[in-house]
Image: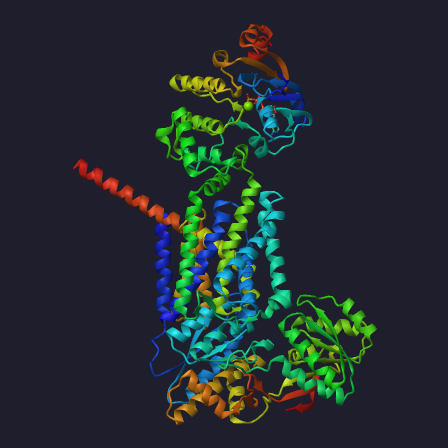
């Protein structure tokens, strides 16, 4: 049981890193990107190749992945931001498709559709990260670090500028900030963080292939951010946890195999649709709403008492 | 003394939208300091002129020189960095940011090397100047209209820009707020900054301007001191359109 | 307010429906086996097809009471993707403590192989054919011939018996096709034949350029390594393009509609030597019950997945006889000791790399029907 929970939590932590980093672009930067899985993949392949051919040092892998991930981010952002901002989603779609093709076809490097197997465990300060427990500790710590970084970033001048950009791009540029540059930095930063998740994924599963970095995965990341609450620090991690853990919970209902798939899909879809229709601010919005209502109710109760 | 180029020089500027000549062969020189009011009826092209100067629009013809440097085709953020600050007629604040953050963004936008502490000091002193220090941490969307106008002003003046373009900053202000506004504009001029002001209230224009430029249908009709301009009866007719 | 109430009541309703669908709890005595198939997503149709084979085998074995306890399947959804498969595998292994897992799809099987090794759980793959699956884990077995084995049987036959030397190879550029290319590259030099590789995309549907290449190469034979509808298109375009060389292929082309095509006449291909006409009791039982339960003809995959359960039962029987607990480790031991298994369609054994060793039959299409040419052991 413990190992199962550990594996589930490891994937949850990875999803949190991915959703939080996508949130920078989507929630704060206001750019709809459906290419986030590409950066996840770039990180995973970077770590796998390093581990298979050079070194399984986690620190080195993360550093290299940050570089390759950041470059991949620029590869998307530089051309994409030349065109109008509204086309970013189209550009990112194209980028995702091209990247998927590269993952699939560049056999010499990515192993093609078959992928890369037998990735050895990572080493960190002389310890081998082999057990699920060790993976969970490392992944959770990095997820916590990412959350802390995102929160700090949003309180910093960078975060202020980014939120201002979302509110009114022209006003921001009239103050002397280059919006394109700001977006570029945001996409690159977000890609760097996502690629760290890729490193952790590769070492945990010890197998990477293109199936994990598809458009579908990118869309799921977007779903995490949106149902959790885009543009908030806590929304995307909540959304990530929901999207990862909910299907696992459903699988415990031990439905017959012919029912399991449809029921899972349906329930999942219905809940997401309802959330999106009735609470566009996501889970965080829902929580805020509950809290507001409590305050109002307390207020009413208080005044009733005063009247009595 | 060697002759230095004027702060702002507009040379034969034209801009049309479809068939509408919003700015028509306009030339104007703005002095290094003092308050210049830009007056004219609705649709005269005043805001369009601001948009041309700040790089939001590219003129069809003509040049814009800032201290002798051609800034005609620079993007807005580069114009801003060259020392031009502006406000917008419809304010365009960052509604989800607090008062402090709105002004801080302006402070950091052109100089990201400023330390958090310096930004804080600069923003707070500017907020004090416009009378908003007490509202520092309120979200801008929750402010009154007059307060929002002062945030917009604070955003423009927090940086050491030499040229300030204020688009109807006093519209809708009255009483003490208007008085505070007058005082701020005068003190900006006293600091040696040059203020170009779009203003409809002629009392305000008379009270704070060093010179006045009169615009109609995209053309510069007249320039002069407030006294000279207000003496011209044909301008009043144009402005109020009463005997046409 | 109303919306949230509605949402809440809907959620409660959905959950109670789910809860009421929960079957009775598993008896501790049952032999639990895990099954990781796509039960949702675009590949769900495979999961549904494959599970028919598994379910039928479990039903038949439980009814026969050959084993002291019942076999109980625990299905998990992989969506044919690595990450859900890893979660599913961890659940099966660590929560349900199953000693045996049936898997499908190469990516999924590769993703769960490290867990199988680590937790000593036997995995039986009956669907993925990627050549890299061979030898991936001591606990991983493939009861489906990886495509290499078929080609290794075909090539010596066509070079020595039919004297075909120059063979153009049209292959889909994916792990399967690359596997085929790999075998050609390794074996042709030894056999004195020459392979002319021509890669195509899995989604291509126009082969004019390829046909032109083949024509100018003047090859004796053309091997088609593709699958599904694309095979038919290639066959037609080759013949329409005036290619009269001997056509060769593998078991994937063994579809009645394809073999009936005029363009397919004379085609030589290989199949797993599964004799569904054999009258051994296991095959007979399979044939009868499959038709009775599903009212259709079994597919090649359904035989494999049926056999996956049969293999498990054979290992369990041995452990019961030796009075040993049914653990993954013991199952592996039993599987290695039994060596040769009686399954649907004949007997199978496993190579040291975990892949099934099965006789391959070489077939020729005559009048729309496959006729056996030879059996290669
Ligand atoms: N982006 C635009 N597209 C088309 N026409 C425009 C645009 N901006 C301004 N105009 C037109 O140009 C003319 C000048 O407009 P402008 O906003 O500069 O006037 P203004 O002097 O600022 O007026 P007001 O006192 O009402 O603010 C008007 O006829 C207006 O309709
Ligand atoms: Mg205007």
Q: Residue at x 43, y 26 (%)?
A: B150
Q: Which of C286 and C42 is in front in this view?
A: C42
Residue in the image at 51% along x and 58% along y? A63
Residue B212 percent location from the top left of the image: 56, 13
Note whether C323 is above or below A287 in the view shown.
below
Q: Hey, which residue is sitting farthest left in the picture?
A: A308
Image spot of residue B209 (x, y percent):
51, 14
Q: Is residue B23 visible?
A: yes
| Quarter of the render that holds ligand 1 | top right
Q: In which quarter of the image is the N terminus of chain B?
A: top right
Position in image of residue B167 (x %, y %): 52, 23
Task: From the viewer's perspective, tell me whether residue C159 is left or right of residue C89.
Answer: right
Q: Is residue A289 left or right of residue A272?
A: left
Quarter holding residue B15: top right
Residue C1 appears in the rendering: no
| Image-based side of C310 in relation to C236, left or right | left
């Amino acid at each position: 049981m413990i190992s199962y929970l550990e594996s589930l939590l490891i994937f949850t932590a990875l999803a949190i890193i991915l959703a939080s980093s996508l949130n920078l672009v989507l929630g704060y930067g206001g750019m709809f990107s459906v290419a986030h899985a590409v950066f996840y993949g770039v990180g995973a392949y970077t770590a796998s190749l390093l581990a298979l051919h050079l070194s399984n040092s986690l620190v080195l892998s993360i550093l290299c992945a940050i570089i390759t991930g950041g470059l991949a981010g620029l590869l998307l952002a530089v051309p994409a931001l030349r065109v109008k901002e509204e086309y970013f989603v189209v550009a990112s779609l194209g980028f995702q498709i091209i990247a998927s093709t590269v993952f699939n076809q560049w056999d010499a490097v990515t192993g093609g559709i078959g992928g890369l197997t037998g990735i050895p465990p990572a080493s960190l300060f002389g310890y081998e990260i082999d057990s699920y427990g060790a993976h969970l500790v490392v992944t959770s710590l990095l997820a916590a670090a990412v959350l802390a970084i995102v929160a700090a970033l949003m309180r910093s001048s960078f975060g202020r500028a980014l939120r201002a950009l979302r509110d009114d791009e022209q006003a921001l540029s009239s103050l002397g900030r280059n919006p394109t540059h700001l977006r570029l930095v945001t996409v690159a930063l977000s890609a760097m963080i996502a690629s760290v998740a890729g490193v952790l994924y590769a070492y945990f599963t010890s197998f990477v292939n293109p199936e994990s970095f598809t458009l579908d995965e990118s869309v799921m990341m977007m779903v995490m951010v949106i149902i959790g609450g885009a543009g908030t620090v806590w929304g995307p991690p909540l959304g990530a946890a929901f999207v990862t853990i909910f299907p696992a919970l459903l699988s415990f209902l031990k439905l017959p195999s012919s029912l399991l798939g449809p029921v899972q899909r349906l329930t999942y879809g219905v809940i997401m649709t309802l959330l999106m229709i009735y609470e566009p601010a996501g889970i965080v919005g829902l929580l805020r709403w509950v809290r507001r209502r409590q305050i109002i109710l307390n207020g009413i109760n208080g005044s009733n008492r005063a009247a009595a | 003394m060697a002759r230095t180029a004027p702060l702002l020089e507009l040379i034969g500027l034209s801009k049309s939208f479809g068939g509408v000549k919003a700015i028509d062969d306009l030339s104007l020189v703005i002095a290094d300091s003092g308050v210049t009011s830009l007056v004219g009826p609705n649709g005269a092209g005043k805001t369009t002129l601001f948009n041309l100067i700040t790089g939001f629009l590219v003129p069809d013809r003509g040049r814009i020189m800032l201290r002798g440097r051609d800034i005609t085709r620079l993007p807005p953020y580069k114009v801003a960095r060259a020392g031009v600050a502006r406000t917008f007629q419809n304010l365009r604040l960052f509604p989800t940011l607090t008062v402090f953050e709105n002004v801080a963004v302006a402070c950091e936008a052109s100089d990201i090397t400023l330390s958090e502490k310096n930004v804080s000091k600069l923003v707070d002193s500017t907020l004090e100047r416009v009378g908003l220090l007490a509202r520092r941490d309120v979200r801008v969307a929750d402010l009154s209209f007059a307060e929002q106008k002062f945030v917009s002003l604070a955003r423009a003046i927090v940086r050491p820009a030499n040229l300030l373009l204020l688009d109807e900053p006093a519209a809708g202000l009255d009483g003490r707020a208007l008085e505070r506004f007058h005082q701020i504009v005068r003190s900006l001029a006293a600091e040696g900054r040059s203020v170009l002001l779009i203003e409809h209230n002629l009392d305000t224009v008379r009270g704070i301007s060093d010179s006045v430029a009169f615009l109609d249908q995209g053309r510069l009709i007249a320039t002069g001191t407030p006294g000279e301009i207000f003496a011209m009866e044909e301008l009043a007719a144009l402005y109020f359109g009463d005997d046409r | 307010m109303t919306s949230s109430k509605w949402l809440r009541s809907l959620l409660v309703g959905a959950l109670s429906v789910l809860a009421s669908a929960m079957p009775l709890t598993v008896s501790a005595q049952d032999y639990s086996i895990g099954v990781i198939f796509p039960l949702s997503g675009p590949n769900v149709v495979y999961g549904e097809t494959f599970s028919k084979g598994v379910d039928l085998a479990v039903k038949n074995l439980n009814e026969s009471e050959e084993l002291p306890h019942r076999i109980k399947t625990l299905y998990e959804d992989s969506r044919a993707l690595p990450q859900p498969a890893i979660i599913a595998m961890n659940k099966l292994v660590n929560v349900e403590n199953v000693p045996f897992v049936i898997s499908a799809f190469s990516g999924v099987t590769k993703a769960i192989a490290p867990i199988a090794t680590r937790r000593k759980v036997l995995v039986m793959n009956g669907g993925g054919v990627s050549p890299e699956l061979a030898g991936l884990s001591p606990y991983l077995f493939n009861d489906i011939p990886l495509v290499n084995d078929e080609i290794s049987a075909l090539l010596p036959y066509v070079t020595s018996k039919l004297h075909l030397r120059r063979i153009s190879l049209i292959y889909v550029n994916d792990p399967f096709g690359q596997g085929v290319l790999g075998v050609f590259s390794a074996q042709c030099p030894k056999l004195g034949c020459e392979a002319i590789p021509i890669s195509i995309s899995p989604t291509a549907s126009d082969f004019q350029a390829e046909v032109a290449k083949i024509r100018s190469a003047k090859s004796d034979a053309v091997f088609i390594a593709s699958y599904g509808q694309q095979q038919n298109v290639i066959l037609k375009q080759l013949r329409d393009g005036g290619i009269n060389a001997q056509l060769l292929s593998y078991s994937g082309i063994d579809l009645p509609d394809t073999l009936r095509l005029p363009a397919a006449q004379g085609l030589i291909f290989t199949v797993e030597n599964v004799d569904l006409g054999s009258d051994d009791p296991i095959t007979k039982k399979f044939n009868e019950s499959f038709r009775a339960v599903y009212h259709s003809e079994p597919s090649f995959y359904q035989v494999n997945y049926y056999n996956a359960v049969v293999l498990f039962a054979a290992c369990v029987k041995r452990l019961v006889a030796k009075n040993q607990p049914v653990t993954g480790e013991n199952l592996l031991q039993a599987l290695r000791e039994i060596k040769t298994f009686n399954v649907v369609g004949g007997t199978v054994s496993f190579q040291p790399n975990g892949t099934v060793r099965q006789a391959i039959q070489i077939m020729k299409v005559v009048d729309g029907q496959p006729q056996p040419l030879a059996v290669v052991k």
